[in-house]
Amino acid sequence: MLGLEKFVINGGRPLVGEVTIGGAKNAAVAILPATVLAQGVCVIENLPSISDVNVSLRILAGMGVQISMVDKTTVRIDTTHLQPDAVPDDLCRQMRASYYFLGALLGRFGQAGVAMPGGCNLGPRPIDQHLKAFREMGAESGVENGRISLRAENGLQEAHIFFDMASVGATINAMLAAVRAQGTVILENVAKEPHVVDVANFLNTCGADVRGAGTDVIKIRGTQLMHGCEYSVIPDQIEAGTYMVGAALTGGNVLLRNVIPKHLEPISDKLEAAGASVEVLEDAIRVWRTGDILPVNIKTAPYPGYPTDMQALMGVLLSRAKGTSIITESVWESRFRYVDELARMGANVQVNGKVAVFEGVAELQAAPVRAPDLRAGAAIVMAALAANGVSEVDGIEYIDRGYENIVEKLTGLGADIRRVEFVQNNTVDQVV
């Protein structure tokens, strides 16, 4: 018998009101390992209250780092007595972003050992580009008993690295290692996402010299000493996009506070094409819809293209469009697994490899469904909010990895959603 949780959602209500967006998950889970590079105290603000952040903090604590919560979104981190050989393998296997401890530890200590990362199953996601960057800076790498080991006997050296693809993880990991290298490291064909820029800004605040983040080329002049700092994580682009889609899907009207509208432009453009209205304010954005949902074609791409993390959410919206829409997924494999769940709710979607064709239906029907991964899970929740009747969504541990207080935030917008504990005994679910 296993105790689990699920969402029970009574759909058909428009989302109306205001919601405050939390800190960016993808920035936070890189900035927390990056504190290893700062020999002293860092105070990180605007941290999202999500399970991936909690795991990152537990990994740091397991290495002897002193962690204290200043308030719900602010943490004080003292890495003075960090033990680089004490990385908890079991925690690293719980999240994909644990690989950032490789770059951070390699940068500060010249060696690192971290268990192979976990996270959502989105198809093959090798870390070959990460290891390529480390090797070109002079580190030797190996894998044994499920652990990745790195060692730079003579320290990390200057290098000119060209990535085979614009990988966010490899770009950030290379930056983390390079800030303590001897000489200048040049990274080309890098990722340009907002959280890449945020990590670079954090490193610079700690005394690093990182230039060009947000462009195709990043230049890093190594420094041998980095200090602590106070830093605030940027707002979460994908959490904001989720509530934007929710407003459009349910025919609601939502004002999102604590956002950077520039980061949301790819999402805003597609929502407007799909018939929603978007009002851009200084640090807020309002989304509403009064007319029909219109068909739109989308192809995901690295920033500033349409984000792959928003693909499933837009797919749910287009399942209700008046006409045919086509979504092409060009970043990750296995990103259409939510379509099977959506079909349980009456959607008409055909998938062929990396292309999905959505024939819009008049309405979605409530059904028992499951979150297949983090972003698809959020999309299924939005589908349930728009569906007629009561849906049950399980697998919500994925959603908790990236969305803080989602029940409270949705309830504040008028949704009828509850988190329910239940016991799974073979195939029988019993509400506790």
Image (spheres, helix red, strand yellow):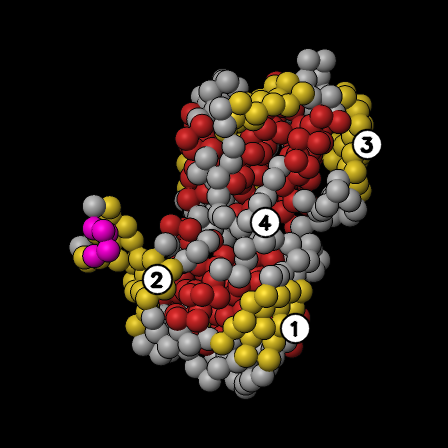
Earlier along the polypeptide chain: callout 2 or callout 4? 4
Q: Amino acid at mark 3?
A: His
Q: CA distance from mark 1 to mark 4?
A: 29 Å
Q: Amino acid at mark 2?
A: Val
Residue 113, compared with residue 410, is above or below; it is above
* Residue 137 appears in view: yes
State which quadrant residue 94 falls in: top left
Q: CA distance from mark 1 to mark 2?
A: 28 Å
Tell me which residue sits at (42%, 51%) in the image. Answer: 398
Q: Which span of residues is magenta-colored?
A: 424-428
Q: Is residue 198 left or right of residue 213?
A: left
Earlier along the polypeptide chain: callout 4 or callout 3? 3
CB of mark 2 within 8 Å of CB of mark 4?
Answer: no
Of circles 1 and 3, the one toward us is 1
Query: Closest to the observer: 87 or 277?
Result: 87
* Residue 267 appears in view: no
Of circles 2 and 4, the one toward us is 2
Query: Where does residue 367 sit, x and y in percent of width and height?
Result: 34, 70
Of circles 4 and 3, the one toward us is 3
Q: CA distance from mark 2 to mark 3?
A: 47 Å
Q: Which mark is residue 79?
A: none
Earlier along the polypeptide chain: callout 1 or callout 2? 1
Earlier along the polypeptide chain: callout 1 or callout 3? 3
Q: Element at badge 2?
A: strand
Q: Amino acid at mark 4?
A: Ile
Q: Where does label 3 land, which residue?
A: 160
Q: Where does label 1 land, which residue?
A: 297
Tell me which residue sits at (72%, 13%) in the image. Answer: 154
